[in-house]
Amino acid sequence: MAGESDARRKKILKDLTERSWTLTELVQRYGAGESSIKHDIMGLRKQGYQIQGGGKKGYRLLSDVENAEKPVFLESIRRDNLSKLTILLILQQEKKALSVAEIQDRYVKSAYNGVLGDGAKTQRQLRERLTRTLLPSMLSDHLITEPEKGYYQVSEQAPVTLPLGTADAYDILDQLHYFGAAHPFAEDLRRVEEKLTIALTDEADPDRDDTYRMIGKKDIGDMKVLEFLDRLKDVPLREHAVDVRFRTRSGEELRTGFYPGLLCYAADKNRLFLMGKNLEEQDMILRCDHVEEISPRQEKNHWYQSPYFLRIYEEMFSISMDPAEHVVVEFDHMFGIRDKLQRMMRHRSHATLRISGEFLIYEDDIRGLEDFAKYLRQYGKSARVIRPESLRQMMIRSARLTLERYREVGL
């Protein structure tokens, strides 16, 4: 069966170099089921082939020239919570403690169909992700235990997970499309659809134009933002510095040379931001709705999606290039606060959460303490800042202003 699938994938790849093919056309051409063809497309994408589209639009293979000319601002990132569920399922099926090497071997078979890129470097990166991020986080969440050094097994507190085959998952995903927005469980079904799509394709929305990094939960709906993204398709942000004409908050018009570092959409602000450095290599943030004109310069750009800016992205709570500060906050362990924090932590790669007696201790490296302070206020007296002192003072000032406001109105 594996040989038959490999042969079919080679033929599909050859077909896609010639023209676009819809799913229905590929099914008819090869006499295979829809789930099998989708699995083949997913396998080719994991091998590195840039295949666009799907559904009514049809699938299309990008040439090397197209790949070079089209700016790719963001490669999709598989969410850690799905990786944790995969590890949890592996340990529950084994029913015994496994070493890191054994977990890695089974993880590759489960998540990558036994094929994980090329060479030892990719294997080493996965091992580092397991040992530095996934397994420590799962220990902190009490999903797994470490009965002896370097060996892990399922915790009694872990939820029971059930395996779902790829073909069944595709069938469920197809059926979810039939439920409209008026369905009483439409929102829940949409979340299920999103999770299945991520698990099968590593993309939250395969048809979405991945030209930005998202901070927040909702997709872009503002036409001005979408129009600006469309303008950027012809600007080589990755390769060259740009000349930008923009308006300040006061309405003054300025022009500057700029090395683009990262393009970010902040869902809470419904705004697109271009982060980078000016020609003196000082950090800058530009609001894209204030940009009047943007054009390439001669200078080469070495900052785009560099480790420097990717680190900033990981540390931002919202849009901010302030220095990162280590934050420690104590929460009451009650009323679903832990679940709420864990949902937020899915987007915080440096965050940790541990139980200390009757309290939850949250730690993180954060840029943009004012936005984080706004987030903490929703917890009221159930959240207490341990450090830094500057964040403690923000929360204290906010509480005093609230109290003064109540006094002003006589309550």
Image: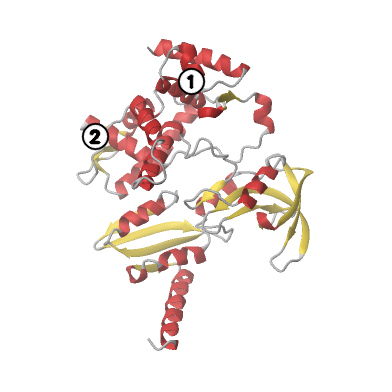
Residue 389 to residue 78: above or below:
below
Residue 68 to residue 80: above or below:
above
Mark 2 crowdedness (10 Å alpha carbons): few <14, some 14-19, many ≥20 = some
Say which quarter of the image contains residue 353: bottom left
- The residue under the point 59% across, 22% down is 20
Is disc 1 placed on a helix, strand or loop? helix
Specify whether 65 is left or right of 96.
Answer: right
Specify whether 176 is left or right of 208.
Answer: left
- The residue under the point 73% across, 66% down is 251
Amino acid identity at mark 2 = Gln
Q: Which residue is mark 1?
A: 24
Residue 32 to residue 117: above or below:
above
Mark 1 crowdedness (10 Å alpha carbons): few <14, some 14-19, many ≥20 = some
Which quadrant would the C terminus be assigned to in this image? Answer: bottom left
Amino acid identity at mark 1 = Thr
- The residue under the point 47% across, 12% down is 30
- The residue under the point 38% across, 39% down is 179
> x and y percent of residue 1 in the render?
37, 12
Q: Which residue is mark 2?
A: 92
Rounded to the nearest angstrom, the CA distance separating label 2 from label 1 is: 38 Å
Residue 241 to residue 72: above or below:
below
- Judging depth in this view, the residue of 226 and 158 nearest the camera is 226
Specify whether 77 is left or right of 336.
Answer: right
- How many numbered dots are placed on residues in this image? 2
Say which quarter of the image contains residue 15: top right
Nearest to N terminus: mark 2 or mark 1: 1
Is disc 2 placed on a helix, strand or loop? helix
Hey, which residue is sitting farthest right in the picture?
A: 298
> x and y percent of residue 271 in the render?
59, 55
> x and y percent of residue 236 in the render?
71, 40
